[in-house]
Amino acid sequence: MKSYLNAVKAVIWKDLTAEWRTRENLTAMLVFALLTVLIFNFALELDIQAQESLSAGILWVTFVFAGTIGLNRSMASEKDRGCLDGLLLAPVDRSVIYFGKVIGNMIFMLLVELIILPIYSFLFTVPVFQPGFLLVVFLGSFGYVAVGTLLATMVIQVRTRDILLPILLFPLTLPVVIAAVKASQGFLEFLPVAEVSTWLNLLIVYDLIFIAVAFMVFDYVVEE
Amino acid sequence: MMISVKKLVKRFGPITVLRELDLEVEQGEFVALLGPNGAGKTTLLRILATLSKPNSGQVSVASFRLPDQAVYVREQLGVVSHLPLLYGDLTADENLAFYGRLYGIGSARQEQVLGLVGLSARKDDLVRTFSRGMQQRLAIGRAILHSPRILLLDEPHTGLDQEAGEILDRVLREVALEGRTVMMTSHDLIRAADLATRLVVLSKGKIRASLSKEQFQSGDLVSLYREAIVGGEGLK
Amino acid sequence: MTDKPRLLTYLDFLTVVVLLIAIWLVFFYAPVEVMMGAVQKVFYFHVATAWVGMLGFLASAYAGIAYLRKSDLRWDVIGYAAIEISLVFFLVAIIMGSIWARPIWNTWWTWDPRLTTAAIVELIFAAYLLLRQGVDDPERRARFGAIYAIFGSISVPLTFISIRLLRTIHPVVIGNAEAAAQGGFNMDDPMKIAFFFSLAAFSVFFTDLLWHRIRLGNLREELGKLRIKAYAEED
């Protein structure tokens, strides 16, 4: 058990260290997210009312798109120098790779989200700094990354690599996105707890289901 | 018997790459695996490295059966591919530290390995800045970090210039001296003959010839090789 | 190679017969519905094709699990065939849904749970096909297809539940008193017969198509193998 955790920590440490050297991935995600927010701003011409009701949706669209970039590049770095083989050669369970990558990707995604949120609330005066809302951001990102990491690992072994990930990922993660948007909206509009908790519970259930299935299936993705 | 392969079959869809291949390698041997492109050398190596699963046949490495006991086999294996398996954005030291943590190896051994492959001076440089020769040396370092009993190398001299190749050979000889079993695929007959204790020729999915040191040192290597290929319905 | 099995020929025959009966039942036996008129007849086929499409989706998930456990490529042929056919059946269901929706709600498309989920399923199918296209190695292709089909079959019901919670104007047809108000209707006996028979008829139709498609897939594999053999011998 100890060596398992050590191995997972090693994978996370490796991703964080490598990314911190160049920060290419993070920068790409951030810039893309900011651009998305800006485009929405101009495309939708929101008045205050609309801002409140649409913010949840806009934020999640932004996170989802930026997330795709992060997922792609994170796994691509393993494929390019054959490093995935290096991970597969280690005398550890395959799931170490999966969990290590999921946590690493989560950290990157959360970092980007935590930078975008203040900027968004600065531009649009929306009460994003509530614990409930932040919880939803966390849970939603988790479900998304859980499926996304699995699919990204698949996709880097496929010819049509770059465009394929969003095409595969978006339809599958709709339950998570829908629940996240509704729960977020609930918190932003200060809706009664009962309504929000339905969506929150759904979100948690979805997360659990997805990560359980992904964990069971991951071996098949990397074997040959 | 370090490596034992009996009637190994590997297919990729409709194409059969390895056809009931038999091979035995004893401890301490340095086997060079030769053969034309597409013969199945890399496929065989990947199966022994637990990266690929056989369709049928019996494979055992270090007395563990594959693919069932693959996890145990991996502890005994060091693999050098023609891709470096190194992270460009990390330093040499960090790369070894990462793999060290995966294999449960401490920093003392990492230092030692860096010295063995002659890269102590560059340990804090990003691997991205290394020449191909240096990357290969570090790759070997990564492979022997956990002192594996078996070393598998897939055309490790690819892309290396004369000098880098010689440094690689020196490291390989030292490593072999430590009693390890080595299996190396190669296109380079001369170099293979220089390093190996046995030459094995693989063509069209089967072992066509196995030459001991005496045999290939005394005979004309190139024609012996040609014979093995042609005799086994290799090139026409 | 195996000739077309006798049983399949019988099934073809049965399919044609059963479909003809279903058509007769729908157009001549079941009464014209009072409020919606003739357009309502579309409903019988619409539900049948959607239902069958769903079966196909489940079949592919089952085949996916079977393939992962047994590594027998025949399961992959089944899974792929099921998805291809379901793709078409769902498309037909969606189009028929549109035809029905237009006169009733004055719109070609409604963002209600069932229709939206159907559209999402089509997207998942399309993604599945694209995924397979990009992989050359048959075993890897089968594995990835299986994994995606499994995920899809878990995700879709969850999506449906979510959207259902969001909104609903889709007719709830069986046993709802307010059905008429939502654009639904209650069925009396002749309609019920026509409805369930259509369901059965389309299930037979689906099985027939699936069988044919699986045979086609297997024949293709054989052809591929023979080709490789021929090229190899040319050397």
Image: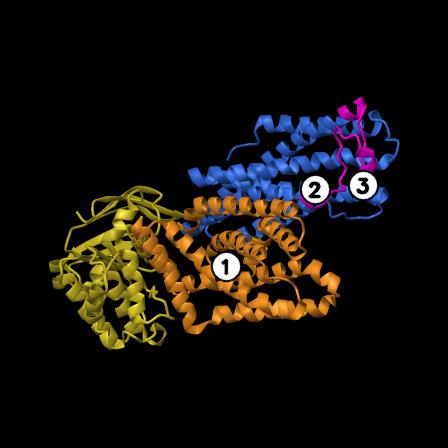
Tag 1 subunit: A
> Helix, strand, or loop for circle 3?
helix
Q: Residue at x 52, y 33 (%)?
A: C2
Chain for disc number 3:
C
x then y, percent, for residue B33? 25, 58
**Residue A5 in view (yes/no):** yes
Amino acid type, label 3: Trp
Distance from disc 3 to disc 1, alpha carbons, whole Å, reads 41 Å
Q: Which residues are magenta?
A: C164-193
Q: Nearer the viewer, residue A171 or A156?
A: A171
Q: What amino acid is labelled 2 in the image?
A: Arg
- Residue denoted by label 1: A159
Q: Which residue is mark 2?
A: C114
The relative height of residue B99 versus residue C26 in the rendered view (above or below) is below
Task: Give the structural element (helix, strand or loop) at label 1.
Answer: loop
- Most common secondary structure along the magenta stretch: loop
**In x, y percent, where is residue B50?**
31, 50
Give the residue number, with chain letter if any, for mark 3. C100
Closer to the chain start, of discs 3 and 2, is 3
Name the tint of chain B in the rendering.
yellow
